[in-house]
Amino acid sequence: MRASEHPNNAPGVPMVFPPWFENLQVKYLNKMVRPLAKVMPGLSTVIHRGRKSGKQYETIVTAYRDGDTVAVALGHGKTDWVRNVLAAGEADLRLGRRELHLVNPRIVPAGGDGTGLPRMARMQVGRMAIFVADVA
């Protein structure tokens, strides 16, 4: 399956990484990185609830913060955690030892205006979509 045919590929939210890499990451890499997420610089954990099940999930991401704005580059496209947070309108983010409550989630599409985003997110917005939320 090509990235353009993958379910995570959505208008304005292209899947940059190939599907084989996504499968490798979900099956193996995430399990190895999960214990390090609390202490490894740059890694964060999004805590969100399933849209239908209501079950709590934790997803490892690379989050960038600038003041009251948090951004995550969506190289894997519009994944389940993104859909869950957009549907709920909120989530929690474990950033190091701090836990932040995120509200007003939105997506800046690939090639969109990166004004107001953290510097690292502005650098990536030309190629991939950016998930943005405000810290409550």
Image (cartoon, helix red, strand yellow):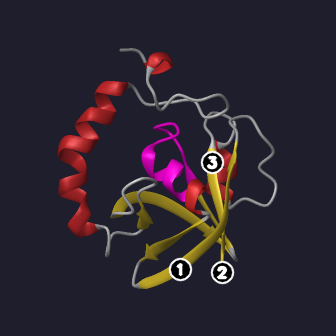
- Residue type pointed to by label 2: Ala
Q: Residues within 10 Å of mark 3 (few under 14, many from 20)?
A: many
Horizontal and vertical percent position of residue 27? 19, 42
Residue 103 shows in this picture: yes
**Left or right for 6, reference 115:** left
Residue receiving disc 1: 100
Q: Residue at x 41, y 78 (%)?
A: 96
Q: Toward which corner of the image does residue 49 lie, by quadrant?
A: bottom left
Where residue 6 appears, x then y in whole percent? Answer: 43, 23
Is 84 part of what is drawn in magenta?
yes
Q: Considering the numbered disc 1 on the image, is that residue within a helix, a strand or a loop?
A: strand
- The quadrant of the picture occupied by the N terminus is top left
Tag 3 and tag 2, C-beta contact below 8 Å: no
Q: Which quarter of the image is occupied by the C terminus?
A: bottom right
Give the residues drawn in magenta, as a range.
72-85
Between marks 2 and 1, how big is the CA–CA gap?
7 Å
Cα–Cα span, label 1 and label 3? 18 Å
Q: Earlier in the sequence, mark 2 or mark 1?
A: 1
- In the image, which disc is placed on residue 136? 2
Query: Residue at the spot x=72%, y=59% of the render?
Result: 117
Residue 43 seen anywhere in this rendered image of the structure: no
Disc 1 packing (10 Å; few <14; some 14–19; many ≥20): some
Q: Amino acid at mark 1?
A: Leu
x 45%, y 85%: residue: 98
Q: Is residue 36 above or below residue 6?
A: below
Estimate the spatial distance between the alpha carbons at disc 3 and disc 2, rounded to whole Å: 19 Å
